[in-house]
Structure formats: C-alpha cells, structure tokens
Amino acid sequence: MSQDERRIYLIRTLLAEETRYQEMEIPSDVPQQKRLLRALFNLRMPRPVSREFLKIQDAYLQEETRQKGITELSDLTPMQDGVYLWQGDITTLRCGAIVNAANAQMLGCFCPNHGCIDNAIHTYAGIQLRAACAELMERQGQEEETGKAKITPAFNLPCDYVLHTVGPIIRGRLTEGDRELLASCYHSCLTLAEQNHVKSVAFCCISTGEFHFPNDRAAQIAVSTVKEYKEQTNSEIEVIFNVFKDVDLQIYRKLLR
C-alpha cells in the first residue's frame, strides 16, 4: 500500500464512522487530503477500531514522520551538562519522553488542524493516544489538576513516552501561584519520568502561547526548576528544552549560556 492509498483508506474509514460525514467528498489534491485526515483524527472521540485500521494508520503516520525527518538525541550538542536546547518539531524527536502541554480534559485538542502542540502530538501519535488518555481519566474520575503529570506510551511517535501536564492559564497579572504551578509542571514531569526509568525528557514551552504565560518568565522557571531538580536529586536525566519560535530560542540561549 502506498502513502496515498493509506491516506484514502483512513479518510474513507473515518468518514464512514459518522453519518454527518458520509456524503463528504474527498479532495483530489494531497495537501487538502492531509488537512482533512488530520481534522478527522482531531475530531474523533475515543472508541474501538479495527486492527486493520490501526495497522494502516500506524504505517502511514510512521512514514509521514520519517519523511519529515527524525532528530536523534545523540545528534544534539549539550548547552550544559545533560541539558540541551533544540529548535524543531517535537513530534520528530527520538528521546525517552516528550512533554505535552495538555488541557484539563487530557484528551487532546479537538479543534481541527489547530496549531497547538497538543494537537500535533495527538495527530502523529495516532488515535491510540486519545484512547489511552481517556482510560486514564476514566479511572481518575475528574479533570487533571494544574501542575500534575500523567504518562502514556508514545505509540507512533519516535520517542518512547509522552508526559502530559496541564500548565496554568494566565488571565491578567502573573501571580506567585502561577509561577509555582508552572514549576510544579516541570518537577512533576521529571519525577514521573524517573519513576518510569525514562532517561531523557524533552520539554516544550509549557503554558506559553495559548495559555499566555510570558515567554521570558516561563523560560526562567523552566531552567531554574530543572537545575534545582537535578542538583537536589543528583539525577542524571537528560533534559532537552524544545522551542519552536525564534523568540524562545533566543531566551533559552541567553539563560543556558
């Protein structure tokens, strides 16, 4: 099966799941097909699916990631002992675990083709990730607390695990409570990673962007919390600060130098 054939199969199967989509026409051009498939992944609620679907989905997503290019942790140069800075697509990084800036539902982003990291991670991990998160949340019986963390397999991502954490949402003036909650996100992820014998963690810029935490203050908290954790616990866990925007790259470069 070619990538084009896989994509058409996945789109047709997902459209057939919903009565309201069954009359929708599949676009002829590849970029629009990819947008439609991502939207269908984003909208799909966790429910059972056939083994054939998972087999074809997994092959499709892994090939898409391969074509984007996988970055190995071993190819990165540390800025400090065991601490790295890398600008790129976190869904293409092969390491122990990547951190997802999740929402309190912990089910991923349901907004079709949204640009948030939650959307990207769930899209390229595959529908198994939402199902795994739904199972965790059903057992918990309530929304995830800000500053805590959960761990799941990474499924079709090149990393081994995904650490999901809910950062503080800033509405107005930044408070000490906001700063403490953000620090707790980093501490919770590191603690959970080590409990699961994860040797390296890539952090996104938690709570910046959609959650409006100031980029410079968020970076300061991230770096100081990681340093304090490593010093206090004598941890040898490797930490990658992953940035996407140039502004964050400059902020982290200054802090880590």
Image (cartoon, rainbow, N blue to C red):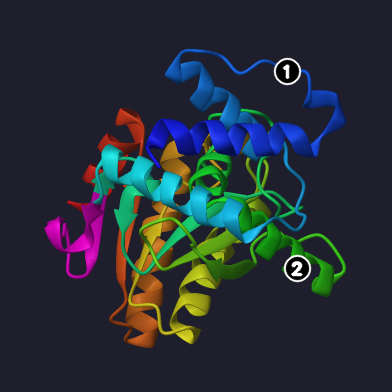
Q: Which residues are magenta?
A: 71-85
Q: Earlier in the sequence, mark 1 or mark 2?
A: 1
Q: Residue at x 53, y 29 (%)?
A: 115
Q: Is residue 173 left or right of residue 229?
A: right
**Where is residue 153 drawn, in percent x and y?**
52, 68
Q: Residue at label 2?
A: 135
- From the image, state whether disc 1 or disc 2 is nearer to you: 1
Give the residue at the far front of this rendering. 1
Q: Amino acid at mark 1?
A: Met
Residue 200 vertical placement versus 207 (above, below): below
Q: Residue at x 23, y 58 (%)?
A: 84
**Where is residue 94 drawn, in percent x and y?**
30, 59
How many labels sit on residues? 2
Q: Residue at x 54, y 31 (%)?
A: 8
Q: Residues within 10 Å of mark 1 (few under 14, many from 20)?
A: few
Q: Residue at label 1?
A: 24
